[in-house]
Amino acid sequence: MQPTRHSRTSLPWWRGRGLVIGVPFAWLLLFFLAPFLIVAKYSISEMGDVRVEDLVTYANGAVKLAAKVTNYATVFTDSLYFNAYLASLKYALCTTLCCLLIGYPFAYFMARARASVQALLLMLVMLPFWTSFLLRVYAWKGLLDEGGWVARAIVGLHLDKALLAMGLIEAPGQLMHTTFSLLVGMTYTYLPFMILPLYANLSKMDLRLLEAASDLGATPWVAFWRVTVPMSIAGIVAGSMLVFIPCVGEYVTPELLGGPQTLMIGRVIWDENFSNNDPPMASTIAVVLVLLIVVPLALFNRYQARVEEAGK
Amino acid sequence: MSKRAFFSPGFAKNFGRAWLVAGFLFLYLPMLTLVVFSFNHSRLPSHWGGFSLEWYAKLADDREIINGLWLSFKIALLSACGSVVLGTMAAFSLVKYKRFFGRTLFSGMVSAPLVMPEVIQGLSLLLMLVAIQHAIGFPERGLVTIWLGHLMIGLSYATVVVKARLQTLNPQLEEAAMDLGARPWQVFTLVTLPMIAQSLLSAWLLTFSLSLDDVVVSAFLSGPGATTMPLVIFSRARLGLDPSVNAVATVIIVVVAIGVTLASIWVARNERKRAAEVSAAYRDDS
């Protein structure tokens, strides 16, 4: 590449190329990687090792001084943590499936809409990105609370009986602070993250392939499952990861819409840090959480790299 | 219904339309309800007590909200500017330099914050900043620390937006400038920058709104007296429904809608102008 060579020979290392790469690189090392290493160190320290006397200053409550032999043993033996991890994975998976179920047909029909409408539709999907995430969650509080119009519609149509039978709510008519309200809230906030990569993928598909399938005798239904879906796997993976990974550690939605039985791991980390004033325990839980999401994260990164390759 | 009927052109078309309409209703009705009920005289979401602006009037006297809004605005402004500068550099590195030491680590670190749970990011930065503060007595937790946290997330988003634009650029234009004797810095400011200006604006707006909206990282990094607006809204929403939140929400939604509309009109206009210039340039050529 011409420009690179030019700048490399004519400028000292700390200008040009060195500066352009160096500044964001240093920034990321300092504010992304270094904090992680500190968390990893905290996670294996006992309360005393990390200068508890100093931690007291910012934790304006009582500090728990009980030394732990190892936080990791606690995480794996205490059923509270184990159940919270399990619940987080379960709800993240359910949310991902809901988003895929709603989002795939949505993206599909969007990609097959008239070209003149597509830009508008895309804009309409992107717009919620610009409105506050917090307010979008809060909006559902008003809708599902007793007397909210969605709650009244669901109860009026006796759909709450079905939700009760599915185990999503505990009592008829009580929709707020249940598994149901949590899943609705998370699906709602993460749906655009599923639609956008799927749309990007489906809109690029060569429609002549479907004609070819049809010429070879495939019905549209068969062609959909054997041509369209396999070709959109990359989009499905990207969308699912964009929904699943943040959902596992979600804090705001479970706090506002979830109930006592929907304790998720983000809330546990929060509580260990803020209520129990136990950063080492919070760090341990965080490290285990990172290990849990590292596989989906790697999948996501690989997909990103492949898109980059294809874009060249 | 047979599978063939399902995919008959007429049915599929109507089914598709219905699905899109239902999807958009799902995306937009909750926000719309929020806006409508901000004008409700009654406190209860179940009861329409008539049109009223009283919650907006109360907003004007709500010191907590106004202070939070001002702080959030300052942080969002700073973090959007910082994110765009750092994000542009990161995007430039990733697009222009195919090989450098630690490139895989670099690109991994750039994209990880996009999906990393915010609770982890907040906790890790908090622990580090507390350690630094103990060592050198700086920074006090408040505006600066929240800004650092938002900058870290904003950097990733800005990089994605700018990178997407840089990848579509025709490198020949930069090479031509180089051949005509432009210094690398001149090439960047005179050729590259004008071509990516729109993506910089999009990145700026996106990181601004992300910062304005953030709860979790801000909660970890805020100190006494530094309560951003989302933190005020969150603590009120936790306690239950609050009409003042609806009023604030409406104000934010309206401001954002106007901002995004203006920006997209500007972008669309520039896009057309640029396309015209490009085609004119090619015409002169032949």
Image (cartoon, helix red, strand yellow):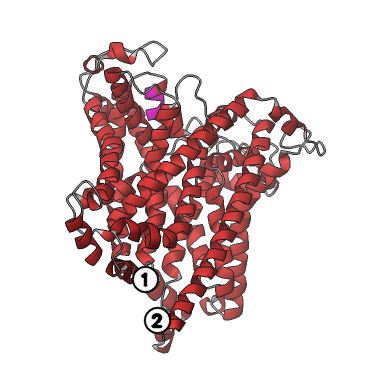
Residue beneath the point at 33% across and 22% down? B130
Inspect the image, locate mark 1, and give the three-letter code of the amino acid beneath it: Met
Crowd tier of the residue under label 1, counting other residues whose Cα lies within 10 Å: few below 14, some 14–19, many 20 or above: some
What is the chain letter for disc 2?
Answer: A
Q: Does the image show residue A9?
A: yes
| Residue B196 falls within the magenta-colored stretch | no
Quarter residue A152 falls in: top right
Q: Is residue B263 left or right of residue A274?
A: right
Name the chain letter of the residue that bears numbered label 1: A
Question: For residue B154, what is the image quadrant?
Answer: top left
Q: Which mark is residue A209?
A: 2
Q: Is residue A249 left or right of residue A293?
A: right
Question: Which residue corresponds to the image point at 50% horizontal and 54% vertical from the top-left?
Answer: A192
Mark 1 lies on a secondary structure that is: helix
**Tag of residue B248:** none
Label 2 sits on a secondary structure element that is: helix
User: Which residue is found at the position 50% from the left and 32% from the top?
Assistant: A255
Image location (x, y in percent) of residue A259? 52, 32
Q: Is residue A100 visible?
A: no
Q: Amino acid at mark 2?
A: Leu
Q: Quadrant of residue B242?
A: top right
Closer to us: A172 or A245: A245
Q: Is residue A153 shown above or below B222?
A: below
Q: Nearer the viewer, residue B198 or A116?
A: B198
Question: Residue at (45%, 57%) from the top-left corner?
Answer: B197
Q: Look at the numbered discs 2 and 1 and tell me whether their residues touch, using CB distance below 8 Å.
A: yes
Which residue is at the front of the view, A197 or B157?
B157
Q: Crowding at label 2, few (<14), some or many (≥20) Cα neighbours within 10 Å?
A: few
Q: In the rendered structure, which segment of residues is drawn in magenta? A: A268-273
Q: Which residue is mark 1?
A: A231
Q: CA distance from mark 2 to mark 1?
A: 10 Å
**Residue A242 in the image: x percent, y percent?**
40, 51
